[in-house]
Amino acid sequence: MSEPNARALRPGHRIALGQDVYTVIQLNGTTVTLQNQHGELSATLLGYLLTAPDFTALDAAPPKRVPQDGRIFILDDKEQRRIRWLEGHLIELETGRHPEGPTREAYDPDLHSMEERELAKLAEFKAAGAEMTQRHLQRLRQAYRADGLIGLADKRALRSLTPCASVDPRVIAAIEEMLADPRGRSTVARSVMLTQVRRKLDETHGLGEVPMPSRATFYRLMNSMDRGRRNFVSEASRQGEGARGDWQPAHYGRFFGIWNEYQKLREQDPSFEPARPVIPAFTQQPFDIDQPQPQPTEPVTREVAELFNLGYEVLLQVLTRFFTHTDESDEQLDVLVHAAFGIMGGVLKPLGNALTRLPVGADNPGCTAGPAFQMFYQMGNFVPWREAAWVLLSERAAVLSRQCAGCAAGAGVPGAVSAAAAAAARIAEQLAGHVPHDLRPA
């Protein structure tokens, strides 16, 4: 799974699943209603959507004013007032609430489609003497999503400016050095580059000595400096699933090579079987499968399978908060990213590998257990309030750590369980560091 995109999902936003592009029509509890390019509607569970390996958020934006770009201040007062006025209306159009006014029924996303809201806004603009076409309004929406407030400014006033105008030169130098490093040619997400640049600057100049730009400004600056050396989107595609161009080192080429090697080995020895004889280790009958499923009867196997499912649940909760965050800072979003990947590599990987070596039980002789990625209920969104959501996240990670540690103390338990307990404890501590002291357990 690729690193998630740090953007919030809202009605009207576009997402991609593989080669297909959808529009988010409605978020209702655990269910997301999508519309494809042909106008057909479908519904899926939010938890499944966020963890799909080919999921990408294309143009989601948080329902609040974006941080100010330093270039705004070179604009005259009249232009600054104009783009701020536009920003408030665009936020109301997207979210149904103007940052400086009451909620109005005409812009409620639950009652009106985006086209209906656009038409209502156009009528309002006309009455205010700022008439424009629907296409121009849509271009303004796209510009605001892509570039924030500066995207609404008169481009003629910005021709002499660059994305570097308000950024510390040491940040620019660090990005230039990393982009030019031949060791950095493999796929890397922009959020990972942000973390690497921040770490490099702290090591070189001292912790916090170099002011970092906002996430949005950093991304725009990085794209500007790329100069064709590292097209992040196309390179990620080429090294992800592409079967064209230089596909041999891509995922497709690697898996194709493994398949060819496997076929040759089977031709030489028809009895060759590289995989373990696993079956899904459901710990109870799944609510969404009608046929009875085998369950492990070996106590240790069952305990490890339950720990794996608990870890998977915590992972989904972290990812859900990441994609539907509210007022998290860039640092807190980075914590969520690292927590998600920490659970994948530090908890699920060792537990999953250990499971495949454990017997299912006497009812399934010769079979070992495989991770079932089992969900015991349909997962919904957290409450929108950040502090309450982070309390729950840190508590769930702490529960995961305690359960793993308790299991690890038993006889015959694989050492991977103890490693998972330590990893979960570190993640719980990182999450708890962003919970107010008065909300932490005594």
Image (cartoon, grey):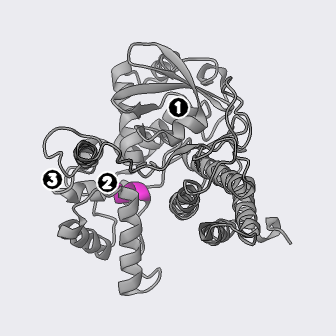
Q: Position of residue 350 (x, y in %)?
A: 55, 62
State the extent of the magenta-drawn residues as a range: 215-220
Q: Is residue 177 left or right of residue 364?
A: left
Residue at the image position 44 percent from the left and 48 percent from the top: 5
Q: Is the C-beta separation of discs 2 and 1 under 8 Å?
A: no
Q: What's the CA distance linking mark 2 and mark 1?
A: 22 Å
Amino acid type, callout 3: Gly
**Which element type, helix, strand or loop, lies under badge 1?**
helix
Viewer-proximal residue among 178 and 267: 267
Q: Which residue is mark 1?
A: 94
Q: Is residue 245 left or right of residue 46?
A: left
Q: Where residue 228 is drawn, which disc sits there?
A: 3
- Neighbor class of circle 2 (other Cα within 10 Å; few <14, some 14-19, many 20+) is some
Q: Where residue 223 is drawn, which disc sits there?
A: none
Q: Position of residue 197 (x, y in %)?
A: 36, 71
Amino acid type, callout 2: Arg
Q: Position of residue 97 (x, y in %)?
A: 62, 34
Main SS of residues in magenta: helix
Amino acid type, callout 1: Glu
**Which element type, helix, strand or loop, lies under badge 3?**
loop
Q: Is residue 230 left or right of residue 350?
A: left
- Neighbor class of circle 3 (other Cα within 10 Å; few <14, some 14-19, many 20+) is few
Q: Is residue 53 left or right of residue 104?
A: left
Camera sees residue 126: yes
Q: Which residue is mark 2?
A: 220
First in residue order: circle 3 vs circle 1 = 1
Q: Let me know if residue 216 is in the magenta part.
A: yes
First in residue order: circle 2 vs circle 1 = 1
